[in-house]
Image (cartoon, rainbow, N blue to C red):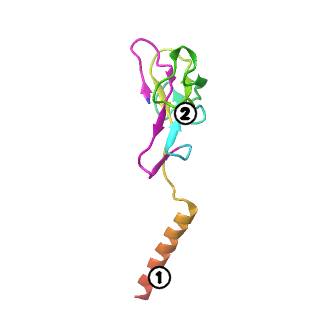
Amino acid sequence: IRARDVFGAPSMIVGEASLSDTGFAFGNATQNLLTTTADWNLSLTGFGAGYFTPTDIGANGTGPWGTQSGISNNARRLWSGQTGGEHYFSVPIYAAVPEPATALAMLAGAGALVLRRRRA
């Protein structure tokens, strides 16, 4: 997420995200993700460079900001502690890898196709 604020630094994020395509998963190996310091990185220079762990300042509902509706109370408020400029909050998304049993079945099926071609 590229964040910028014309009135000051975009220093905090709280939220939850989900993926609708089962072919992909977040870095936590699920299709649902809350803002946590374990899953999110922060950069002040752009995507893919200069990452550091944001500061956890409490759960959704903490502090003077109140509870953000539509966001789980387990989502954490992530704070950069930096002033000025743009902030880049990032989380990896990977192509889903089939579970071992499915992968093995796919390999066995491919091997059977090779054997059939040789016999013909």
Residue 111 versus residue 62 in the image, above or below: below
Q: Pick the residue in front: 96 or 45.
A: 96
* Magenta extent: 2-26
Q: Pick the residue in front: 69 or 54.
A: 69
Residue 44 versus residue 39 in the image, above or below: above
Residue 92 seen in the current view:
no
At a point 39% along the width and 14% down the height, the residue shown is: 6
Q: Pick the residue in front: 71 or 105.
A: 71
Of the 4 image quadrants, the one containing the N terminus is top left
- In reply to whether residue 5 is colored magenta, the answer given is yes
**Which amino acid is tagged 1?**
Leu
Q: How many marks?
A: 2
Of the numbered discs 2 and 1, the one sitting upstream in the chain is 2
Residue 81 versus residue 94 in the image, above or below: above
Residue 90 seen in the current view:
yes
**Which amino acid is tagged 2?**
Trp
Residue 27 is tagged as none
Q: Residues within 10 Å of mark 1 (few under 14, many from 20)?
A: few
At a point 45% along the width and 78% down the height, the residue shown is: 114
Q: Where residue 17 appears, x then y in whole percent?
A: 46, 37
Q: Pick the residue in front: 80 or 33.
A: 33
Q: Where residue 97 appears, x then y in whole percent?
A: 51, 56
Residue 40 is tagged as 2
Q: Where residue 111 appears, x then y in whole percent?
A: 49, 76
At a point 41% along the width and 11% down the height, the residue shown is: 7
Q: Which residue is mark 1?
A: 115
Of the 4 image quadrants, the one containing the C terminus is bottom left
